[in-house]
Amino acid sequence: MNSKTLKEDGFIDFYPLKELAFLNMPKDEGHVFVLIDRTLTDKPTSDILYIGRARKPVKKVFGGYLGGAGGRTTKKIHKTLFNDNYIEKTSISWMASDNPRTTQRELLEKFRSIHGEYPPWNPPRKVATKKKPNASQKPRKPAVRRTQRTQ
């Protein structure tokens, strides 16, 4: 899975992140986007750095990745772009999606099934598991509410 196969899936052309303008960005609706390393295009390894989603792509890209506001992963991407000089070699593409969360999850799983791990800038996913109660722990009975009797 790389930038060429993503175009077959419906992603638009890639724009260099350094030259991106508001006019190039999509409207405020659900989108899945991909950041790639242009120096790895046509190499044996994948050029995909990150697969993300946003309901407001302009805010996510300009306020988050380029501006530095947001959560842990967004700030990490911002730091990598500017401190490690990735801004010069990173491009972005996106595609509209009615359900960006599901589309992102499907793309991440497809990437992992091919490459054995998630893209380098995506945090590793934790597998949700239910905790089993220990044999020594008995389930608690619900508390009974007692009311005072008046005489």
Image: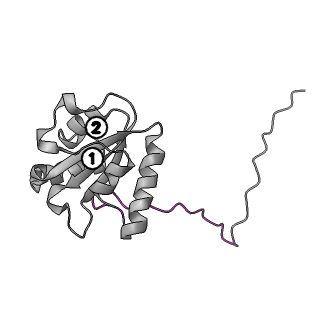
The amino acid type of the residue labelled 1 equals Thr
Q: Is residue 126 magenta?
A: yes
In which quadrant of the rendered image does the N terminus lie?
A: bottom left
Q: Which mark, residue 66?
A: none
The amino acid type of the residue labelled 2 equals Lys
Q: Is residue 21 left or right of residue 117?
A: left
Residue that mark 2 sits on: 60
Farthest residue toward the bottom? 135
Res 125 seen here: no
Rendered residue at 90%/26% (across/down): 151
Residues marked 2 and 1 touching at CB (< 8 Å): yes
Q: Which mark, residue 74?
A: 1
Q: x, y (%) of residue 46?
A: 27, 64
Q: Nearer the viewer, residue 119 or 16?
A: 16
Q: Is residue 121 left or right of residue 20?
A: right
Q: Quadrant of residue 100?
A: top left
State the separation of the CA atoms marked 2 and 1. 8 Å
Res 151 seen here: yes
Q: x, y (%) of residue 59?
A: 27, 33
The range drawn in magenta is: 118-136
Q: x, y (%) of residue 69?
A: 23, 39
**Colour approach in the figure:** one colour
In front: label 2 or label 1: 2
Q: Nearer the viewer, residue 51 or 82?
A: 51
